Amino acid sequence: MPKDLWLNLATVDIQGRGLLVLVSPTETGDQIHRFVQRHGLSGVHHIAVLCEDVDEEAALLFAEGWKRTSVEPARDGGLIQWFIKNQIGQILELISRPSQSHNTFTCNNIRLLRSSEEK
Ligand SMILES: [Fe+2]
């Protein structure tokens, strides 16, 4: 993964009701640092929505005007994830866990998703 996309990451399980993921830059000027400069320390990068079928949900949202950020979803480590965005740049992450696991993210998932973002 390009060093520009590295990040510090912490995941908090909110009593089994969801995951809160916090990130911070690894160095001044990297992609996360630029995001913080644009949106502030409390900026929300995206909200993830758990769904049974990422492709089916994406098709419905594409019909509503949402756009893909990559050609296809990231599929790795028991997770399927897809960043899509609306006209004002808000990002929604569609996420599916076909194995019913509580797997967190692999480096490859993060690389695929981060690579789909705007620089
Ligand atoms: Fe996410």
Image: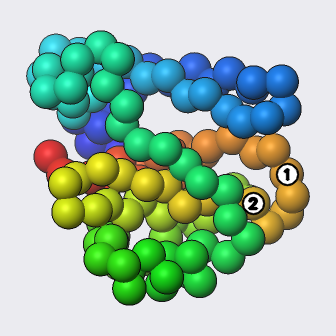
Q: Is residue 93 above or below residue 57?
A: above
Colour pattern of the rendering: rainbow
- Name the residue that disc number 2 marks: 97
* Amino acid at the residue labelled 2: Arg
* Amino acid at the residue labelled 1: Ser
Q: Which mark is residue 63?
A: none
Q: Is residue 106 above or below residue 94?
A: above
Q: Please, which residue is most extreme toward the front here? A: 64
Q: Is residue 76 found left or right of 3 in the rendered image? A: right
The CB of the residue at mark 1 lies under 8 Å from ligand 1: no
Q: Is residue 62 visible?
A: yes
Q: Is residue 76 found left or right of 17 in the rendered image? A: left
Q: Is residue 91 found left or right of 99 in the rendered image? A: left
Rendered image quadrant of residue 76: bottom right
Q: Quadrant of the N terminus?
A: top left
Task: Check disc 2 and report its element: helix, strand or loop.
Answer: loop
Q: CA distance from mark 2 to mark 1?
A: 6 Å
Rendered image quadrant of residue 112: bottom left
Question: Which residue shows up at 85% across the image and 51% down it?
Answer: 101
Nearer to the camera, 62 or 34: 62
Percent across and percent down for residue 75 are 59, 67
Question: Which residue shows up at 37% across the image and 64% down it?
Answer: 84
Question: Which residue shows up at 75% across the image and 24% down it?
Answer: 14
- Name the residue that disc number 1 marks: 101
Question: Which residue shows up at 62% across the image and 64% down it?
Answer: 80
Percent across and percent down for residue 35 are 21, 30
Percent across and percent down for residue 54 are 60, 73
Q: Is residue 86 found left or right of 37 in the rendered image? A: right
Q: Is residue 26 visible?
A: no
Task: Check disc 1 and report its element: helix, strand or loop.
Answer: loop
Q: Is residue 103 above or below residue 116?
A: above
Q: Residues within 10 Å of mark 2 (few under 14, many from 20)?
A: some
